[in-house]
Amino acid sequence: MKRIWRVTLAAVAAFAMAACTNTTAPSDGGTGTDDDIKIGTLLDVTSWDPAQADIGFDGPYLSAVYDPLVSLNEDSDPVPGLAMSWKYSADRLKLTMELREDVTFSDGEVFDAAAAVRNLEHLKAGVRSGATYANVERFEEVDEDTIALHLKQKDEALLYYMGLGRSWIASPAAIKAETLATQPVGSGPYTFESNTSTPGSEYVFTKRPEHWDDQTYPFATLHVLPIADPTASFNAMLSGQLDVAYANATDIPRAKERGWNVAADVATWVGIQFTDRTGERLKPLGDVRVRRAINHAFDGAAMLESVGQGAGAATNQVFPAGGPVHDPSLDDRYAHDMDQAKKLMADAGYADGFDVTMPMSSIFQPWQPSVEQTLGELGIKVAWKDLSPADYQKNAATYPMFVAVLALDSNPAASMDGRIVSEQWFNPNPSTQDFPEVQKLVDEALDTTGADQLPLIRELNEEITEQAWQSVWYQADNTYFSVEDITVTPITGMMFPTLRFIQRG
């Protein structure tokens, strides 16, 4: 499997702005209109074209105008969208879907099997969305209301990725016209009001009458406002301009004082990504004792408090804390112990350390002093190469190790795929074949499905923790505030939840 992963640079920027203070006079917040909701998200929409959009913060925008073939529930399990049901063949290489029959797009086009196939082909060809369908060989119109996805190999994460934000369905006419990037045309619960919207500032949507999933979307009018500064976002809540906001964890006490709801869950892991576990470019990293030493050297719990504002979970694992694979007994596998770290370095023959060049960007600077000091105590001398934020994602993985903040996924198969198995921008050489026990567990897990995978993925999680696959300091929360009568359900994997997870009550 090969998928393009999501770097959460926006989330890092939010953490970096955590020192901001707020001085606006208090208010109860809220727009005061039952039929109106205003949501403050961190980033502007990247594209209205589902094939070009980003999963991370585009959820509120795209879920307003598009219906998905597959949705997720609050447990991140796939549930029906425009696909009412689905069934795999015995060999798991054919996925047949039965489609809804009562759906039209806002331009009057009818949703049917032909429309579904046209969208899936468009998504498979997409620069951002295509990785979801890497294991799909072809899409088939079985009949007017039935489609089949023919797979080249089993893909237990496919339905999860589709539900996460990779099966939004647009009008085939708009796909053909190549206008989707700026003019969304879908069958979703809302219509985009371009005449009353201000791109980059506020997007306005009105509810479509008699939408097939009407009960899931209780608000008649929707406003989505991209607000990059957490101070401005908090102040907008205070003044009643927002009902929901992407939040700064330092503001949680004040939010609770005002009676707002606070919702949070782990969203990213923070630490050092090793791209050269075999020591091909930097020999010391090929010795597991060195990787373990680096893990022991960092005080993740202290970094969570000092840089992460205490919002998250101190753990050495890349599977989400609280999830079905995460093992609490492994959280202290690399408890902070500089003496043990130095002993491991000496045992590996590097008592005096070694030199390493690492990339650095402005958005990662909150962690830079700790990294330099901690590695320095092991004798590891860091030469920093300054990069722009955009160049960091492009070039960080060309270095043997780098500071990383990377998105988590709530689905175990997706986590295994993205963190261990697949070639990613941040992990260009997965190198599982160089670790026999890792490869054995990967192969066994890929040969199973569903619940049968979980014990094997748990074993795999333990093995990569033992192999010090990364140096994970902690998992960081995403936090959301909402006024008293509106609830937000965080979904690990979505940097901002889609509208189905923002409800009244």
Image (spheres, grey):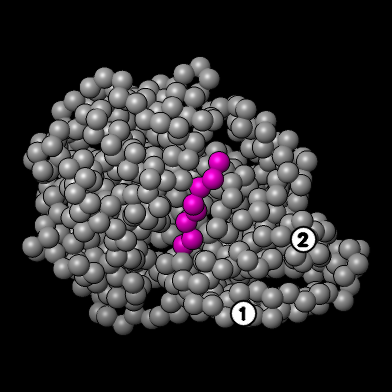
Which circle's residue, 1 or 2, is located before the other in the chain? 2
Give the residue at mark 2: 280
Query: How far, Cα to Cα, is label 1 from label 2?
Result: 20 Å
Quarter occupied by the N terminus: top right
Expressed as whole percent of the image width and height from the top left, the position of residue 125 reads 38, 45
The residue under the point 75% across, 65% down is: 281
Identify which residue is drawn at 49% across, 24% down: 93
**Residue 495's quadrant in the figure?**
bottom left
Q: Amino acid at mark 2?
A: Glu
Q: Mark on residue 385? A: 1
The residue under label 1 is which amino acid type? Lys
Q: Position of residue 234 (x, y in %)?
A: 31, 71
The stretch drawn in magenta includes residue 3: yes
Residue found 30% across the figure and 29% down from its top? 83
Residue range (magenta): 1-8
Q: Along the horizontal axis of the image, is 186 left or right of 345? A: left
Quick one: 242 or 133, which is closer to the camera? 133
Q: Which mark is residue 120?
A: none
SS assignment at label 1: strand
Image coordinates for residue 33, horizontal then vertical, percent: 11, 57
Q: Is residue 58 magenta?
A: no
Q: Is residue 146 above or below residue 252?
A: above
